[in-house]
């Protein structure tokens, strides 16, 4: 058996995966014999896959065959157990980086089944964790059904089974994604190039951009050097910093300014845990429902996840595009009403996301008039 993770990853022709797996492999090796001695999937669990995920018999039968193939191959078995352990047991899920579906190229067109099994294997452990924490199973079990839709989208595109949005669906099989009043919440680790402060006297918020980031003239992130109109700076002179400030409406100011950080307390920094919120389709997206949901989420996570101490709330969505106020007014749009209750930070432009959620299509058409 290969002793290094990187060699094994290359041998099985896995895609690029996060660097944290290297150190995790070293911690996994002493546990390998114990964790790999049982079947990768408990055979009795397959009888529940239709109920848990809504999977059809054909897919379930293919997953059974893949599970047997994994158990019969020492390399596949070790890697499967390791990747499941690394994502769900080596550290809290919300502290791990996003990853692509770990599909071993040596499995050919069946490689996507491997990734589906990595996720489904976690459900029995999640159900036990929900019971331990005193969380009703029903709401969280609705999340499991997410796997079916994304597996079917993968099959429609690739002609074989697999899992789209792998990391999102990994979240869906953990106990962390819960509904509170109207919105759904899960803990995330803040990793954006901004730091948020609050003035000690006035209470005003101050958001500062990291240095070395490129932006368009309008203060939104640039994708390439050719698109970059200015690059942010961050210079220290004691507690005085020369830095680019972020507008609450979601733009970075093009000119840097000096700030005395002794006048501020730091609120949110890199690696802090926030509660990410997800907005359901349909009615109910109002300022009042958002406020009630935030209060309910704080109470819920304090009760059931006392180890999590969130520093605030976070949402990554086209609904917070800083360009929408150029098209809509607060009087006619609840989207803008809610925007004005938040502090928006500029991330990236993602027209595909807009197309998916507004028009229910896979991507924006080449001809924008369409």
Image: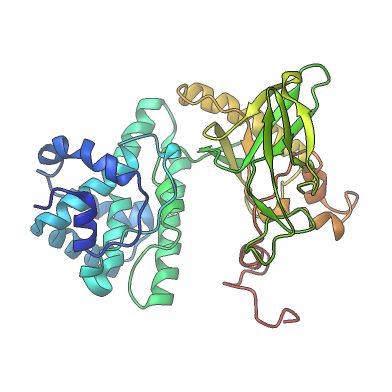
Q: Is residue 171 above or below residue 65?
A: above
Point 30% across, 36% down: residue: 90
Q: Is residue 57 visible?
A: no
User: Residue furthest toward the top?
Assistant: 201
* Callout count: 0
Quarter-of-image position of residue 59:
bottom left
Quarter-of-image position of residue 193:
top right
User: On the rendered structure, is 80 left or right of 319?
Assistant: left
Q: Is residue 164 visible?
A: yes
Point 14% across, 41% down: residue: 32
Position in image of residue 63 (x %, y %): 24, 62
Point 35% across, 54% down: residue: 17
Position in image of residue 192 (x %, y %): 59, 43
In depth, the one of 79 and 193 nearer the eye is: 193
User: Residue furthest toward the front?
Assistant: 237
User: On the rendered structure, is 73 left or right of 142?
Assistant: left
Quadrant location, the C terminus: bottom right
Point 38% across, 73% down: residue: 155
Q: Is residue 198 above or below residue 80?
A: above
Colour scheme of the picture: rainbow
Position in image of residue 7 (x %, y %): 20, 56
User: On the rendered structure, is 167 left or right of 160?
Assistant: right
Q: Is residue 54 above or below residue 181?
A: below
Position in image of residue 229 (x %, y %): 74, 59
In depth, the one of 3 and 72 nearer the eye is: 3
In depth, the one of 194 and 276 nearer the eye is: 194
């Amino acid at each position: 058996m290969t002793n290094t993770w990187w060699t094994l990853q290359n041998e099985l022709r896995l895609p690029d995966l996060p660097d944290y797996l290297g150190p995790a492999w070293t911690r996994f090796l002493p546990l390998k014999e114990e964790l790999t001695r049982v079947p990768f999937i408990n055979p009795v669990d397959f009888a529940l896959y239709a109920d848990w995920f809504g999977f059809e018999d054909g897919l379930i039968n293919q997953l059974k065959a893949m599970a047997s193939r994994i158990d019969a191959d020492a390399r596949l078995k070790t890697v499967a157990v390791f990747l499941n352990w690394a994502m769900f047991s080596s550290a809290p899920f919300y502290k791990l980086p996003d990853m692509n579906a770990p599909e071993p190229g040596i499995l050919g067109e069946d490689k996507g089944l491997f990734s589906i099994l990595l996720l489904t294997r976690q459900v029995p452990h999640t159900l036990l964790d929900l019971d331990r924490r005193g969380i009703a199973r029903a709401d969280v079990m609705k999340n499991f059904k997410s796997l079916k839709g994304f597996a079917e989208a993968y099959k429609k595109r690739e002609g074989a089974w697999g899992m789209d949005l792998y990391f999102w669906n990994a979240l869906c099989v953990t106990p962390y994604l819960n509904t509170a009043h109207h919105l759904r919440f899960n803990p995330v680790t803040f990793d954006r190039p901004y730091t948020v402060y609050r003035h000690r006297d006035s209470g005003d918020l101050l958001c500062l951009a990291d240095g070395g980031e490129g932006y368009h003239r309008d203060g939104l992130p640039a994708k390439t050097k050719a698109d970059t109109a200015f690059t942010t700076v961050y210079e220290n002179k004691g507690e005085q910093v020369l830095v680019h400030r972020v507008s609450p409406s979601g733009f970075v100011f093009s000119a840097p300014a000096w700030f005395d950080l002794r006048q501020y307390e730091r609120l949110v920094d890199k690696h802090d845990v926030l509660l990410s919120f997800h907005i359901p389709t349909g009615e109910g997206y109002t300022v009042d429902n958002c406020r009630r949901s935030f209060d309910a989420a704080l109470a819920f996570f304090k009760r059931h996840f006392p180890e999590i101490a969130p520093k605030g709330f976070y949402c990554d969505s086209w609904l917070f595009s800083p360009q929408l106020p150029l098209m809509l007014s607060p009087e006619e749009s609840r989207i803008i009403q809610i925007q004005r209750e938040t502090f928006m930070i500029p991330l990236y432009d993602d027209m595909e996301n807009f197309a998916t959620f507004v028009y229910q299509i896979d991507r924006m058409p080449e001809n924008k008039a369409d």
